[in-house]
Image: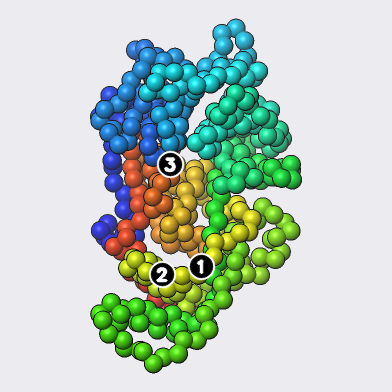
Amino acid sequence: MAAADAPITVKEILSLKSIGIKEQFITFTNVTMESEKYICVRETFPQHSVVIIDMSRPMQPLRRPITADSALMNPNGRLLALKASLPGTTQENLQVFNIETKAKMKSCQMPGQVSFWKWITPELLGLVTQASVYHWSIEGDSEPVKMFDRTANLANNQIINYKCDSSEKWLVLIGIAPGSPERPQLVKGNMQLFSVDQQRSQALEAHAASFASFKVFQVMSIHQFLYLLQQKVLMLARQHQSCILSNLVPSQRPQLVKGNMQLFSVDQQRSQALEAHAASFASFKVMSIHQFLYLLQQKVLMLARQHQSCILSNLVPSQGLQLLQKNKQTFSFLLILLMTFQLPCRYSLIHVITKLGLLYVYDLKTAAAVYTNRISLDPIFLTSESSSGRGFYAINRRGQVLLATVNQSTIVSFWYFLILLAAQQS
């Protein structure tokens, strides 16, 4: 498939080397990107400094003489969080500064080493120590609050990520460890899933995870599908000041299922109730006519939204539990490569980006493979989701900042190609 026809487009939007960042500082421990707004680089030579790159004006980096072990820019505002060890102690000093007013907003001292930290929301920092995980709010004068203790499966692991869902009720800590002596190159992935409400943890084996929720539609009957097509024709007819099907009587509106589609359930009580519905989408190989109509329905809805209209104006957002999304397919050859999930919500796609620059795209509702391509010849060590919901950013060891987005001009035709291919296989 030609690059112009690909459903995912990738382009370089910035080279860190072009703005004076040396290659030795383009690493996971020196570069942070908490959102698409800022990139933060920590330099230690020829002097200690922190470089703040505003992505709205990337060729005008702000370099400040700051000595710190880690630096994070707030996902939304011009707030800089700094972490530094206190000489002669095992304590670490955490500070948050407003870089516009040059004022310190907040500070605290942690009794032990903070091995990993991250902005999990614009108001909340997640702090991971050797034994526990804390949340520190930048609002008010509160101190870090302990959320949970680390499970044994994360002992001696390098922590590479920490996330929460939109309700902040589900938390997941992700680490990696060396492989077995027989195959040391296959890095092990370990996770700890924690429920705030239940105050319980579950140890899992995985390299990456993310949270998402979405609407689940009931599979349409042929009558319901024809009704939607009729409404589409009527809408187009009205746009042309005529009525082609003025005497048609609409059938009953299709009933919609409210809830969450799961790929991996974090709630055992609800998982049984959703299991039957999930199985009809998660594991099919040969597409039935109902599945074909379901996918075609989604395309009609997408086309309708592009014309600033909504065929199903009574869609109700799901109110069920936020569920951890995890692809059930196994990639034994990718264990060492798998790096991160990104979930662009607009198109309900899962982006799996590997360390070696491979991109795997899956449908969120069905876990079906959609697209595969290499997006970087150099190892990728950092990714960040695009706020538009259409793609993600990635930084590789060469210093390229890449933006991968859904190609809106080809994504619909690409989906039709997949539908026809599945129909031929059946």
Q: Amino acid at mark 2?
A: Cys
Which residue sits at x=50%, y=36%? 122
Residue where numbered disc 2 is placed: 310
Q: 10 Å neighbourhood of mark 3: few (<14), some, or many (≥20)?
A: many
Q: Is residue 262 left or right of residue 373?
A: right
- State if disc 1 and disc 2 touch (CB < 8 Å): yes
User: Observer-nearest residue: 61 or 395?
Assistant: 61
Tell me: 141 left or right of 33.
right
Labels 3 & 2 near each other (Cβ < 8 A): no
Residue 44 visible, this orientation: no
Which numbered disc flags the more N-terminal residue, 2 or 1?
2
Identity, as a three-letter code, of the amino acid under mark 1: Leu
Compare marks 3 and 2 and give the one earlier in the sequence. 2
Residue at 38% in and 43% down: 393
Horizontal side of 265 relative to 117 (left or right) equals: right
- Give the camera-side residue of 144 and 127: 144
Measured as percent of width and height from the top left, residue 54 is found at 33, 32
Which residue in the structure is indicated by mark 3? 384
Secondary element under disc 3, as helix, strand or loop, is strand
Residue at the spot of label 1: 315
Could you say which quadrant of the image residue 248 lies in? bottom left
User: How many numbered dots are placed on residues in this image?
Assistant: 3
Tell me which colouring the rendered structure shows: rainbow
Reply above or below: 160 against 63: below
The spot of residue 43 in percent (x, y) is: 38, 19
CA–CA distance between discs 3 and 2? 31 Å
Whichever of callouts 3 and 1 sits on the residue coming sooner in the sequence is 1
Q: x%, y% of residue 312?
A: 46, 72
